Amino acid sequence: ETGVTQTPRHLVMGMTNKKSLKCEQHLGHNAMYWYKQSAKKPLELMFVYNFKEQTENNSVPSRFSPECPNSSHLFLHLHTLQPEDSALYLCASSSGQGSYEQYFGPGTRLTVT
Amino acid sequence: GESVGLHLPTLSVQEGDNSIINCAYSNSASDYFIWYKQESGKGPQFIIDIRSNMDKRQGQRVTVLLNKTVKHLSLQIAATQPGDSAVYFCAETPNAGGTSYGKLTFGQGTILTVHP
């Protein structure tokens, strides 16, 4: 266990659905991240939150909407997704205080039909 | 654009052998490097890291070597075990000392298979 949990672990949704991914870290970290992992592509950074403030948006389409209500929780709200959005979505956290080691959750395997 | 990439997508070794996984990076401003291991069904797990002011760092059964001249990073695993079978990613960030968090750029990954 890395101290980062993600729910659900698997999600199948239609293109017209709205769903949310949840991430929680129990490490007392201040920075949280969303990554997309597709087959045969490197991990793609999507969003970064540092002390609850969004500091990075890596040109992510607006159908992905992040939310960080506090330093321990991170959400990714999904709506009107496309089949090419099917991937493993990974959440990570880091201390946000000069340490760059990121701790990853197990990911949510998303399939868009 | 800047990228981090791996020379070999797959590596097969016998149990007990030493493994070497390579990584090339292109950003000369990269300041911090990290190796992750990802097993099937799990998220990436930290293995070892190294800063640009070092050229070697050792952990338990693992050693990371950094050659800044040719922008090359390697991960050496001693006495490889079946439990080492996984995908290994290198990642880098130029932000060490800049921001309080790291904006990591990941390589594509190398699949390591260890045969008993």
Image: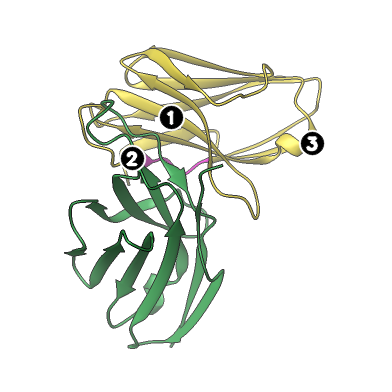
Chain colours: A yellow, B green
Residue name at image x 36 percent, y 52 percent: B45
Against A83, is A54 above or below?
above
Mark 1 Cα-neighbour bin, 10 Å: few <14, some 14–19, many ≥20: many
- Rounded to the nearest angstrom, the CA distance separating label 2 from label 1 is 9 Å
Specify the principal SS of the magenta part: loop
Q: Which residue is mark 3?
A: A83
Label 3–label 1 contact, CB within 8 A = no
Task: State the extent of the magenta-drawn residues as a range.
Answer: A103-107
Location of residue A112 by image quarter = top right
Residue name at image x 55 percent, y 33 percent: A8
* Element class at badge 3: helix
| Of the image marks 2 and 3, the number of the one nearer the N terminus | 3
Measured from the top left, where is residue A55 in percent x and y? Answer: 42, 18
Image mark for residue A102: 2
- Rounded to the nearest angstrom, the CA distance separating label 3 from label 1 is 23 Å
Chain designation of label 1: A
Against B43, is B61 above or below?
below
Evaluate whether residue B115 shows in this view: no
Depth-wise, is mark 2 or mark 3 nearer the camera? 2
Residue name at image x 38 percent, y 76 percent: B20
Mark 2 Cα-neighbour bin, 10 Å: few <14, some 14–19, many ≥20: many
Location of residue A20 by image quarter = top right
Image mark for residue A33: 1
Label 2–label 1 contact, CB within 8 A = yes
Q: Nearer the viewer, residue A26 or A82?
A: A82
| Of the image marks 3 and 1, the number of the one nearer the N terminus | 1
Against B77, is A43 above or below?
above
- Rounded to the nearest angstrom, the CA distance separating label 2 from label 3 is 29 Å
